[in-house]
Image (cartoon, rainbow, N blue to C red):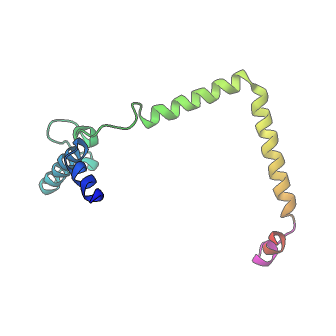
Amino acid sequence: DDVRRMIDDFDRSAVASQNHDVAESLRGRAQRGGYPWSGSEVEGGGTGTAALGIRSKYKASFARQVRTLWQRMARTVRRHPFLITLHFVATGFAALSIGAIFFNAGRDTGGIQNRMG
């Protein structure tokens, strides 16, 4: 009874209405041969999900987000050069430690299992 009521409430919601509109738009476009993922122009102008009225979860594009993170990291490295040195030292130490564990272990399965226990 509760599940049926939740389903009915969802069916009457704005989200269900938008899902239905998008599905109908895609169905019609597929029948006409215009696919938004192929980059073809869709009715109303534009391409892809923006033309379908689907809003992105993020305001900035993926490329902008990556560029911003790189800029932030570069700024941190310029402000604290010791941090990058510490990262390199820690990476080298980890590499040497793991190398020492598997030194002369052999390249076959038996050699690796011998080291792993």
Which of the image's four quarters has the C terminus? bottom right
Residue 107 highlighted magenta (yes or no) = yes
Q: Is residue 98 left or right of residue 60?
A: right
Query: Observer-nearest residue: 91 or 26?
Result: 26
Query: Observer-nearest residue: 2 or 71?
Result: 2
- Which residue range is magenta in the image? 104-112
Q: Which residue corresponds to the image point at 82% horizontal and 40% vertical from the top-left?
A: 89
Q: Which residue corresponds to the image point at 83% horizontal and 70% vertical from the top-left?
A: 115
Q: Residue 61, image x and y in percent?
A: 41, 34
Which of the image's four quarters has the N terminus? bottom left
Spot the residue most to the top.
79
Spot the residue most to the bottom.
110
Q: Residue 90, image x and y in percent?
A: 80, 42
Residue 52 highlighted magenta (yes or no) = no
Query: Observer-nearest residue: 19 or 39?
Result: 19
Q: Is residue 45 left or right of residue 112?
A: left
Q: Residue 98, image x and y in percent?
A: 82, 57
Q: Is residue 60 left or right of residue 32?
A: right
